[in-house]
Image: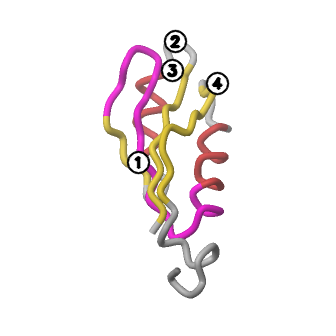
Amino acid sequence: MVISSLVVETVLGYTEAVAQKLPSYEGVEVHGIDGYKIIITIEAPTVDESHATANAISTLAGVIGVDLIYLNFEDDPTIFPNGV
């Protein structure tokens, strides 16, 4: 399982609408809103899937940036196929 923490930056006036859409993405949880920024985590099986989710979020109307804060990928089977 890959766990990443991100900040989604939005255009003023879009923050609430974007925050309401985010949980529809598999593995995404909203943890809070600070002004025009939304704090989220993504849980995905691989780094590539986590990255794909973040890229999809970046295309939402009103999103101006998706910034990675933290990434734990020690259990990604595509990076560590033998669990090492």
Label 3, label 4: how many angstroms apart (C-alpha)? 10 Å
Residue interval drawn in magenta: 32-50
Answer whether residue 13 is magenta in the image.
no
Label 1, label 4: how many angstroms apart (C-alpha)? 18 Å
Between 13 and 36, the one lying in front of the other is 36
Q: Earlier in the sequence, mark 2 or mark 1?
A: 2
What is the secondary structure assignment of the residue under circle 1?
Answer: helix
Between 57 and 1, the one lying in front of the other is 1
What is the secondary structure assignment of the residue under circle 4?
Answer: strand
- Label 3–label 2 contact, CB within 8 A: yes
Say whether residue 48 is left or right of residue 34. Answer: right
The crowd level at tag 3 (other Cα within 10 Å; few <14, some 14-19, many 20+) is some
Q: Is residue 45 above or below residue 21?
A: below
* Residue 23 numbered mark, or none: 1
- What residue sits right under mark 3 in the picture? 14
* Residue 64 numbered mark, or none: 4
Residue 29, horizontal then vertical, whole percent: 37, 47
Which residue shows up at 56% across the image and 87% down it? 82
- Label 3–label 4 contact, CB within 8 A: no
Which amino acid type is marked by label 1?
Pro
The crowd level at tag 2 (other Cα within 10 Å; few <14, some 14-19, many 20+) is few
Which amino acid type is marked by label 2?
Leu
Which corner quadrant of the image does residue 66 belong to? top right
- What residue sits right under mark 2 in the picture? 12
Q: Earlier in the sequence, mark 4 or mark 2?
A: 2
- Label 1–label 4 contact, CB within 8 A: no
Q: Earlier in the sequence, mark 1 or mark 4?
A: 1
Which amino acid type is marked by label 3?
Tyr
